[in-house]
Image (cartoon, coloured by chain):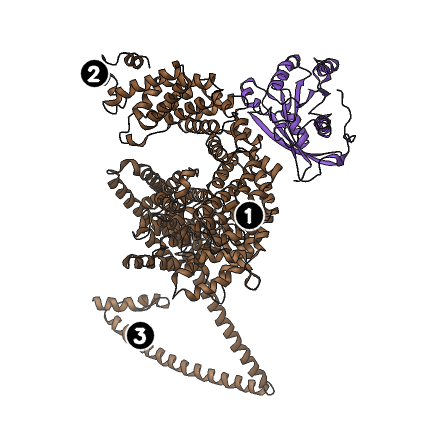
């Protein structure tokens, strides 16, 4: 149960882009081809290691449907990281990104780290959004970007871990006041936070980051 | 609102009109209402249109006072005040005092005034105001935003106002808060505020999270668990005051029906903080104040909820339960639970019971935890004893039925799906067994406690068929006693009945624990034991008195309905699982006994009654009550009373605890099988083998006489069966008549069963017809065969006679032969001098023969001479008579001379 830091994540994006499947792949390492529609929010958790420090990820997977927006917005402020997901085979999910981003900027804290994920990259033959477009969008809005597949698990670990690594780096850089829990970061008992880890110690598992 | 407003503007005109128009609708306190109305209006006017700040403030203060005191003023305020005050809140955020006053006024307007209680259908001004305020779309976001104000009183009154709104219109407020961005975040921040605000916020959140799952999740997302536990720690854990209770109530709300939150609690904080609430600190271990008791009970409730693994019907429930059980066990919760439940002599009953229940939930369907509890010791070193022993002792000794059921629950959970544990208990069973036996005479209660334990243990064990054999063995050879346990049990049933009547006579002196449940429990044990176990049934029927006793129990009136139903089940099982062939003990005999002594209709009616009990039992015990702050103060004492009140089992909560769904389902299955079997029994003859036509034929190589004998015995059997069927048919008919008679009274209830009877007897009649026809043909056949047999017999007789004469003949031949042989022998013996002898004999024989013939010749010559003279004489006479003698004598050579004589006579 001991951890150096605890990060709260949210997963947002249109309905049906595979948010719950990404979470399931990350926490349980399995894929469910038919997943029930998420009602409200679901919770998942996993321990990862960054810079040799145990870090607990608390992940809230939100419902993509419009009717749940008012509920899901309640989760924005307290989150340190967000995975903004679209479906590379459905153009409209990409087109909605701007409104999602606006929502996030409005309700979340300004330092929230957002990772843009183009999911279902295993379905290359049905691709409707090119990788370049995704990269372009991420660059414009200051997001980290990655294409992933919850089905094949490609880049799923990386997506969550790279986000964590970015947050971790921000902590090391003193961007956050970690004593204020409203940023979605909590200092735990299991590790010694602070300079001991070294400023330059970036994630050992960081890689494939296409920001 | 419009007519009221109009009226207020012209108060003088509408006096009468108002009383008529609104009198029926609204409560109109007294004649001063109108004054108050206008007073409120004037104050509101001063607030909204006043110029001097002081004037407006004093108007606000006055308004608050009026509204707090009079319900008619509340009503008047509700009619016109909200827009005014909301605009104050909205637009004058820089004037803290005004806002404070406005909030306080609103709180007052929403607080019910007690004086007007009484009439039920009147409109309560506070409720109406709260409804009106919550309908204002902007009011909730506005109030939530006020929570960020620096002024302490503003936050305080805002929280109070929200709580008041929540109690009156919870759904609307929940929605409003959910749709306000960061609404819950603001409320959560209040938990870190100053103590007074924090406590208010706790209450508000507790109300808010009671049902809305989404709010529960958001509250948890905002770090509710950490905050709750840190407050509890601050307040001193279980020794803390009512705030701790509020915290645990909030905690319970968050996890009770929320699997996701349960997981989060386990994953991120763990159960350690929860368990530490249960720790009894040195020095405080003997001191259980009422508040501490409530705190502990609530914390134990949390543990229990978590051990259940989430809401009913959730697919992941079992997995959650297992992982929660494991996590709790890792944190050594068992030590604390045992301390509270079994060791501490100072813990109040409610705490002890709850702790015991948690132990049960901890071990149920969890083999590791079962092992853990089995190997656990409690007590200080010299007096340490196994934990299970201590709990067992509670069952034996306690005088409180709640505690009894709680301890019983531990064993029930322990035994479920736990074959090893069952075996262990079974092996330990012999010890209390002997104690109970010794004490049977002098102390009924203790022995019953022990018996009860065995009963329960065995019930659970019985669910596992594989252990059945073990149990039987253990039961058959109880320590040092040749008497089978089963038989003793029946004795206890009878004994329980007798003590019960005795108690009734003596108005139950100790009173604390009535024995009314003992009989049904032992009967239940018998039911579970006998079912699916023909050996046990056989053993049960070994004593003929058992059957009689059970029959008496069913037909008698001294036992309760439940007991009678169970006794009926026992009989049914005796029919169902009976493999005995002995006369008077087979299923036929029992069915006959049932139909004769009880009657099938009323027998089956017992089942229906039993089902009715189950139904009422589950419908009353199903709803789970939520413990709330208001109810928890009285909860300590009320629980027992409540149980007693609800209980359908003639006032025994013990029974209520013992009838679990498993048993009910079991009974339901059993009942169906019994009904089938009884019908089946009726449609069959005693000796099972129906007449197969092929068997009636003479077998190849079978001797006639054997064949006849076989046929005869078969006929005898048939005759027997027929007799049997006739008797049974008669009883059935009687029953039918009786049912038909009572059917007039309760046609609806009895109809299906009488119909069944009719069907049965119809089937029987059919069978009877068939049998009669068979008998007829058999008779014909028999006659034919007998005829044949007679013929054959005659023939045999004749042949025999022949043979006899033949053999006689042969015998005589043989004898002759023998005689001749012996003669020959003897002859040969004397064979040395035969020659001259033979000559001599020959000569002698010849002489003799010569002599003889000479004599004869002489005689003949004399006769001839006489005849010659006669002829001479006669010839002379004839000559004299002129007859030609020569002519006459011519034929004499051939004929006698008779005709001559005749002629002579004729002359």
Which is nearer the N-term, disc 2 or disc 3? Answer: 2
Which residue is painted at 26% across and 20% down in the image? B35
Per the image, the residue denoted by label 1 is B363
Q: On the picture, is B428 further left or further right than B37? A: right
Q: Which marked residue is nearer to the observer: mark 2 or mark 1?
A: 2
Quote the CA–CA distance across marks 3 and 1.
153 Å
Q: In x, y percent, where is residue B899? A: 28, 66
Q: Which marked residue is nearer to the observer: mark 3 or mark 1?
A: 1
Which residue is painted at 75% across and 36% down in the image? A196
Q: Which marked residue is nearer to the observer: mark 2 or mark 3?
A: 2
Q: Colour of chain B?
A: brown
Per the image, the residue denoted by label 3 is B871
Quote the CA–CA distance across marks 2 and 3.
192 Å
Which is nearer the N-term, disc 2 or disc 1? Answer: 2
Chain label for disc 3: B
Q: Are marks 3 and 1 on the same chain?
A: yes
- Asked if residue B685 can be seen in this view, the reply is no
Per the image, the residue denoted by label 2 is B16
Secondary structure of the residue carrying numbered label 3: helix
């Amino acid at each position: 149960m001991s951890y150096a830091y605890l990060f709260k994540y949210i997963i947002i994006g249109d309905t049906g882009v595979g948010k719950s499947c990404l979470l399931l792949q990350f926490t349980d390492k399995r894929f469910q081809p038919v997943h029930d529609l998420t009602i409200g929010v679901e919770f998942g958790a996993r321990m990862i290691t960054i810079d040799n420090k145990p870090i607990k990820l608390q992940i809230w997977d939100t419902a993509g449907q419009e009717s749940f927006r008012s509920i899901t917005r309640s989760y924005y402020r307290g989150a340190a990281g967000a995975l903004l997901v679209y479906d590379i085979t459905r153009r409209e999910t990409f087109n909605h990104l701007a409104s999602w981003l606006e929502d996030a900027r409005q309700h979340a804290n300004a330092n929230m780290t957002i990772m843009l994920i183009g999911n279902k990259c295993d379905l290359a033959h049905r691709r409707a959004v090119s990788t370049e477009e995704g990269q372009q969008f991420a660059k414009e809005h200051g997001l980290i970007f990655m294409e992933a597949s919850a089905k094949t698990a490609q880049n799923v670990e990386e997506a969550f871990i790279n986000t964590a690594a970015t947050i971790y780096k921000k902590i090391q850089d003193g961007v956050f006041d970690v004593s204020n829990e409203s940023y979605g970061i909590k200092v735990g008992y299991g590790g010694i936070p602070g300079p001991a880890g070294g400023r330059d110690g970036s994630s050992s598992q960081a890689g494939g980051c296409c920001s | 609102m419009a007519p009221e407003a109009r009226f207020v503007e012209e108060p003088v005109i509408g006096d009468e009109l108002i009383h008529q128009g609104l009198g029926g609708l609204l409560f109109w306190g007294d004649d001063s209402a109108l004054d108050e109305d206008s007073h409120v209006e004037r104050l509101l006017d001063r607030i909204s249109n006043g110029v001097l700040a002081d004037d407006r403030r004093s108007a606000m203060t006055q308004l608050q006072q009026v509204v707090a005191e009079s319900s008619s003023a509340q009503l008047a305020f509700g009619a016109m005040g909200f827009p005014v005050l909301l605009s104050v809140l909205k637009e004058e955020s820089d004037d803290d005092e005004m806002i404070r006053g406005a909030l306080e006024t609103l709180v007052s307007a929403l607080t019910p005034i007690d004086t007007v209680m009484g009439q039920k259908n009147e409109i309560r001004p506070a409720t109406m105001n709260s409804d009106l305020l919550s309908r204002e779309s902007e009011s909730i976001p506005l109030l939530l935003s006020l929570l960020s104000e620096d002024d302490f009183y503003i936050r305080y009154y805002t929280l109070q106002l929200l709580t008041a709104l929540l109690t009156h219109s919870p759904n609307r407020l929940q929605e409003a808060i959910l749709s306000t961005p960061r609404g819950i975040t603001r409320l959560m921040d209040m938990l870190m505020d100053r103590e007074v605000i924090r406590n208010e916020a706790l209450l508000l959140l507790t109300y808010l999270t009671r049902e809305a799952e989404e709010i529960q999740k958001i509250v948890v997302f905002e770090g509710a668990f950490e905050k709750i536990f840190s407050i509890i720690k601050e307040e001193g854990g279980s020794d803390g005051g009512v705030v701790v209770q509020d915290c645990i109530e909030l905690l319970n709300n968050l996890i009770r029906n929320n699997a996701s939150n349960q997981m989060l609690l386990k994953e991120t904080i763990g159960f350690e903080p929860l368990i530490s609430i249960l720790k009894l600190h040195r020095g405080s271990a003997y001191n259980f104040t009422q508040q501490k008791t409530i705190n502990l009970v609530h914390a134990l409730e949390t543990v229990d909820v978590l051990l259940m693994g989430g809401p009913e019907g959730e697919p992941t429930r079992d997995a959650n339960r297992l992982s929660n059980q494991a996590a709790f066990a890792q944190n050594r919760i068992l030590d604390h639970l045992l301390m509270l439940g079994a060791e501490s002599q100072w813990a109040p009953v409610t705490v002890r019971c709850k702790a015991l229940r948690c132990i049960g939930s901890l071990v149920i369907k969890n083999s590791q935890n079962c092992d853990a509890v089995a190997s656990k010791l409690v007590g200080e070193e010299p007096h340490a004893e196994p934990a299970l022993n201590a709990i067992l002792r509670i069952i034996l000794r306690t005088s409180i039925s709640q505690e009894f059921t709680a301890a019983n629950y531990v064993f029930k959970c322990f035994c479920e799906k736990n074959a090893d544990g069952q075996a262990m208990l079974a092996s330990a069973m012999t010890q209390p067994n002997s104690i109970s036996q010794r004490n049977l005479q002098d102390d009924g209660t203790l022995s019953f406690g022990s018996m009860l334990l065995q009963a329960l243990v065995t019930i659970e064990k019985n669910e596992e068929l594989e252990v059945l054999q073990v149990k039987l063995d253990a039961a058959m050879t109880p320590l040092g006693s040749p008497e089978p346990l089963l038989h003793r049990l029946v004795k206890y049933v009878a004994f329980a009945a007798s003590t019960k009547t005795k108690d009734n006579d003596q108005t139950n002196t100790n009173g604390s624990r009535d024995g009314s449940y003992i009989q049904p429990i032992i009967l239940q044990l018998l039911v579970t034991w006998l079912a699916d176990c023909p050996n046990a049934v056989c053993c049960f029927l070994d004593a003929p008195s058992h059957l009689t006793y059970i029959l008496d129990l069913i037909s008698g009136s001294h036992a309760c309905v439940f007991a009678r139903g169970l006794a009926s089940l026992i009989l049914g099982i005796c029919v169902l699982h009976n493999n005995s062939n002995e006369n008077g003990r087979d299923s036929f005999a029992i069915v006959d006994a049932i139909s004769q002594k009880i009657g099938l209709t009323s027998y089956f009616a017992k089942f229906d009654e039993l089902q009715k009990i189950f139904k009422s039992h589950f419908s009353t015990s199903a709803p789970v009550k939520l413990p709330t702050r208001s109810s928890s103060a009285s909860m300590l004492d009320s629980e027992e009373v409540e149980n007693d009140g609800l209980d359908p089992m003639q006032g025994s909560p013990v029974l209520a605890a013992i009838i679990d769904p498993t048993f009910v389902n079991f009974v339901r299955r059993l009942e169906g099988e019994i009904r089938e079997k009884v019908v089946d029994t009726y449609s069959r003859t005693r000796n099972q083998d129906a007449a197969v036509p092929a068997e009636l034929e003479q077998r190849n190589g079978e001797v006639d006489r054997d064949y006849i004998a076989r046929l005869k015995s078969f006929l005898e059997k048939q005759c027997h069966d027929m007799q049997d069927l006739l008797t049974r048919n008669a009883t059935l008919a009687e029953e039918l008549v009786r049912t038909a008679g009572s059917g007039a009274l309760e046609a609806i209830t009895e109809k299906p069963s009488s119909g069944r009877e009719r069907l049965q007897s119809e089937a029987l009649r059919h069978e009877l017809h068939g049998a009669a026809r068979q008998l007829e043909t058999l008779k014909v056949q028999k006659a034919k065969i007998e005829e044949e047999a007679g013929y054959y017999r005659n023939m045999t007789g004749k042949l025999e006679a022949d043979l006899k004469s033949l053999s006689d003949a042969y015998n005589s031949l043989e004898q002759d032969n023998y005689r001749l042989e012996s003669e020959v022998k003897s002859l040969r013996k004397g064979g040395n001098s035969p020659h001259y002898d033979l000559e001599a004999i020959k000569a002698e024989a010849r002489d003799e023969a010569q002599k003889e013939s000479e004599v004869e010749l002489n005689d003949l010559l004399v006769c001839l001479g006489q005849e010659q003279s006669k002829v001479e004489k006669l010839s002379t006479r004839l000559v004299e008579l002129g007859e030609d003698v020569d002519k006459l004598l011519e034929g004499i050579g051939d004929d006698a001379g008779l005709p001559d004589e005749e002629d002579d006579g004729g002359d």
